Amino acid sequence: MISNDNDYLGKIMRRIILRRIVTNRCQAGKNKVSLTANGQLFPCDSFVGEERYCIGNALKRERYNGVLEEIYVDSVSMCSQCWARYICGGDCYHNSFLMKQNVQDIDGMFCKLQKYLIEQTIVMYCQMNEIDSALFARLTRKIEISTREGVN
C-alpha cells in the first residue's frame, strides 16, 4: 500500500522517497479533463456542471480559458511560503471552490491536516529506514523502478 500512488499516505510517501517536487495538487485542467455526454470539457469530474469552469467542447472543437492552468503553489499566497508546499501541491481546486468560492483560496483546515499528515509521513519514513534499512532500500528501489516503468 505504501507504494500505491492512489492511496493518500502512499502518495505523500512516494513523493518523499522520490524527492519529487509537486507544484500543483493534481493535473486537473492540465493533462486531465472530464468529458460530458454533450461534449463539454471540465478540469475534473468534480467541476462537471459548474459552467464557469467549462474549459471547452470536444464536439464543437472549442477550447476556452483553462482557469486552473496557471495555478501553482508558488502563485497561491497561502502556499507560497509554506514549508510543505512542494510535497503537498496545494489544496484540491474543487475543495477550495466549495469552501471559499475561489479555486485559489486555500481552506485553512485542509492545510493543518495536510501538514500534519506530511509530518507523520516523514516520521514514518525515518522510522522505516531506522528499523530495517535494507528492506526500506528495497522498497525505495521498487518505487523508483515502478515509476520509471509507469506502473503504480
Image: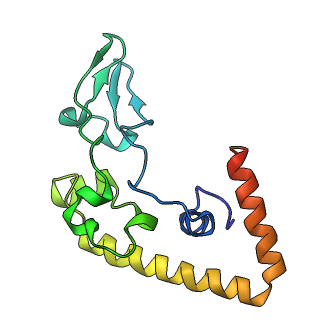
Q: Nearer the viewer, residue 71 or 54?
A: 71
Whether 92 is drawn above or below 139: the answer is above
Q: Residue at x 44, y 36 (%)?
A: 32
User: Which residue is at 54% across, 60% downward?
Assistant: 20
**Which residue appears farthest toward the top when viewing the image?**
60
Residue 95 vertical position relative to residue 127 in the rendered view, above or below: above
Q: Which picture quadrant has residue 36?
A: top left
- Work out whether residue 129 can be spotted: yes
User: Where, by quadrant of the figure, is residue 64 drawn?
Assistant: top left
- Find residue 69 and report its horizontal and vertical position in percent: 30, 40
Residue drawn at 48 percent across, 76 percent down: 118
- Name the image quarter holding the N terminus: bottom right
**Image coloring type:** rainbow
Residue 76 in the figure: left or right of residue 20: left
Specify whether 106 is left or right of 39: left
Residue 55, position in %: x, y? 28, 29
The picture places residue 35, in percent across and down from the top left corner, at 40, 26
138 relative to 65, above or below = below
Identified at 27% across, 44% down, the residue is 70
Q: Position of residue 74 (x, y in %)?
A: 28, 59
